[in-house]
């Protein structure tokens, strides 16, 4: 009930009056700007290093509050989430939002990005630390499977010298090292 009231009060009334919108179907760009400014959503920019590949240059949209995202998707309890077709996307949203919030709480601009080329190869999260990049693969599965780090393996072959640290965050509970990659549970991020 609280989320429905919040949505109606803040999004449909307060935000609408902030930008003086009479028509709810107005341009998405203005809505995105206000939702971003009010920390409802964030836009994760693509990383600029192309490694001789054609890149996707549009940012990805994430909610700071994944409970609000679930509410908008009409997911009402955990059992619906466990089998929902967007479970992986919501898991990715949650981890990326938590990483961004950790930086923001430290009064730092989050040095986080994603990377995707036009062939569909993607790294879910890149954390830039000076000249170093930490590629992070995000998997909602609670049990580790051997194909989970495939994207990180592809990244290593492409990035060469830029791939000395790798991380996989998954929906399980254990942490370990695997062939130069750190595997961490979702709650340790």
Image: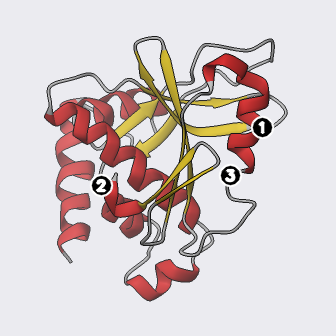
Foreground mark, 3 or 2, reads 3
Real-space CA distance between mark 1 and mark 2, rounded to the nearest whole angstrom: 31 Å
Label 1 Cα neighbours within 10 Å, binned few <14 / some 14-19 / many ≥20: few
Which residue in the protein does label 2 denote?
65
Check the image and report above or below for 175 versus 2: above
Image position, residue 105 (x, y; %): 15, 36
Contact (Cβ within 8 Å) of mark 1 with mark 2 = no
The label number, if any, that marks residue 120 in the structure image: none
Q: Residue at x 27, y 51 (%)?
A: 12
Which residue in the protein does label 1 denote?
154
Q: Is residue 180 left or right of residue 39?
A: right
**Which of the two residues, 167 or 76, is positioned nearer the viewer here?**
167
Check the image and report above or below for 10 versus 103: below
Task: Give the structural element (helix, strand or loop) at label 3.
Answer: loop
Q: Is residue 9 left or right of residue 147?
A: left
Contact (Cβ within 8 Å) of mark 3 with mark 2 = no
Foreground mark, 1 or 2, reads 1
Q: Residue at x 59, y 28 (%)?
A: 164
Residue 27 visible to the viewer: no
Image position, residue 143 (x, y; %): 58, 75
Real-space CA distance between mark 1 and mark 3, rounded to the nearest whole angstrom: 9 Å
**Which of the two residues, 7 or 60, is positioned nearer the viewer here?**
60
Q: Is residue 103 left or right of residue 168?
A: left
In the rendered image, which quarter is residue 156 located in? top right
Which residue in the protein does label 3 denote?
149
Q: Quadrant of the N terminus?
A: bottom left
């Amino acid at each position: 009930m609280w989320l429905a009231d919040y949505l109606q009060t803040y999004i449909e009334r307060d935000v609408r009056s902030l930008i003086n919108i009479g028509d709810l179907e107005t341009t998405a760009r203005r809505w995105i700007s206000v939702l971003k400014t009010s920390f409802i959503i964030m836009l994760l920019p693509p990383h600029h290093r192309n490694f001789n590949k054609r890149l996707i240059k549009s940012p990805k949209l994430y909610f700071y509050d994944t409970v609000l995202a679930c509410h908008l998707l009409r997911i009402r309890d955990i059992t619906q989430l466990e089998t929902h077709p967007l479970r992986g996307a919501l898991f990715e949203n949650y981890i990326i939002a938590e990483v961004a919030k950790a930086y923001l709480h430290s009064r730092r601009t989050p040095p986080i990005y994603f990377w995707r080329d036009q062939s569909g190869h993607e790294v879910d999260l890149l954390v830039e630390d000076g000249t170093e990049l930490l590629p992070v693969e995000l998997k909602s599965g609670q049990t580790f499977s051997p194909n989970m780090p495939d994207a990180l393996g592809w990244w290593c072959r492409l990035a060469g010298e830029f791939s000395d640290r790798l991380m996989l965050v998954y929906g399980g509970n254990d942490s370990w090292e695997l062939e130069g990659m750190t595997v961490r549970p979702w709650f340790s991020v």
